[in-house]
Amino acid sequence: MPSVNEMVAFARVVEAQSFSGAAERLGTSKSSVSAQVRRLESRLGVRLLHRTTRRLALTEAGAACYRHCARLLDEAEAAEQAAGAFHAEPRGTLRISAPDTFGWMHVAPALGDFTARYPGIAIDLSLTSKHVDLIEERFDLAIRIGALPDSSHVVRRLAQSRLVICAAPEYLKRRGTPRDPGALAAHDCLRFAPLGRGTLWQLRGPGGPFRVPIGGGFVTNSGEVLRAAALGGLGLGLMPVWMVGDALRQGALVPVLERWAPQPVPIQAVYPGNRLTASKVRVFVDHLARRFGATPYWERGFELGAPRRR
């Protein structure tokens, strides 16, 4: 049976993408790590790594083996953290995945206060539009916006994301203000690719959700570009308040068709539920919940349907 030390050495090599990096992390020599990986391959009777002068790559058997080794390390780290949680400050590297635009606008600014309070926690923040596999990619938690598929993960609601149709005053002066959803087909509407590249927006009326045709040919997969396009007067955008709340308060963007605003969607923290929750995860999720507040700070001063000065 493979030894735990061999499995740990192999997992660290995969994570560091080098024998020298794994040796540094384990506090041992490169030759010792290499020997342990060779012994593991010998015991299993398969090659786990393709070795070249430039890089390491997992074989198919190596990828399967790594998944089991990673789970073993997770369980060992969870046991250690659980035992020390009663007297030790949270510490270690916290790997976080968050949506691109929300991450840099609202997660990154929350890190200063957090690391000042918990100096033993190092942050590894990855911003991406895709839903990462927390287990396979070894993330401690992810921030997700919108409906989630069923899973064994723990989900904690942090806030809600309200959507608003808005445009720059210059655009509305040039093209007019739409008074009902049917007018959107004659307007330049800015489309966000992750919500679909089609020519329909889903809104909500007294009878519930409905789809309405929209005009315009602009489409982007970037939230920052979508916001900039609306601010630049290119057209009407359907965007979350957390992205444009400041522009709405300042009058740089003007909301329209507020009676037909889409159903809000949740902003949630998701983390693995198949092991004890590390204290570093718990304190970070608590920190975000406090920072966002019962009424998220990005919505304060802006209420859908409330009268506004022009």
Image (spheres, rainbow, N blue to C red):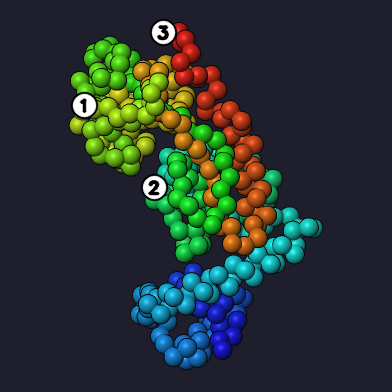
Disc 1: which residue: 215
Which residue, given by chain and number where applicable, does mark 3 sit on?
A: 310
Contact (CB < 8 A) between labels 3 and 2? no
Q: Which mark is residue 129?
A: 2
> Does the rendering let one see residue 124?
no
Secondary structure under tag 1 reads loop
> Considering depth in this image, is 54 or 141 the residue closer to the camera?
141
Q: Quadrant of the C terminus?
A: top left
Using the numbered discs, state the Cα–Cα distance from disc 3 to disc 1 in whole angstroms: 26 Å
User: Where does residue 26 sit, x and y in percent of width and height?
Assistant: 60, 75
Q: Residue at x 37, y 78 (%)?
A: 59
Real-space Cα separation, disc 3 to disc 2, in angstroms: 36 Å
For residue 17, which quarter of the picture? Answer: bottom left
Q: Cα distance, mark 1 to mark 2? A: 25 Å
Q: Position of residue 306 (x, y in %)?
A: 48, 13
Q: Quadrant of the N terminus?
A: bottom right
Instruction: Report the amino acid beneath label 1.
Output: Gly
What secondary structure is found at the residue carrying circle 2?
Answer: loop
| Mark 3 vs 2, N-terminal side | 2
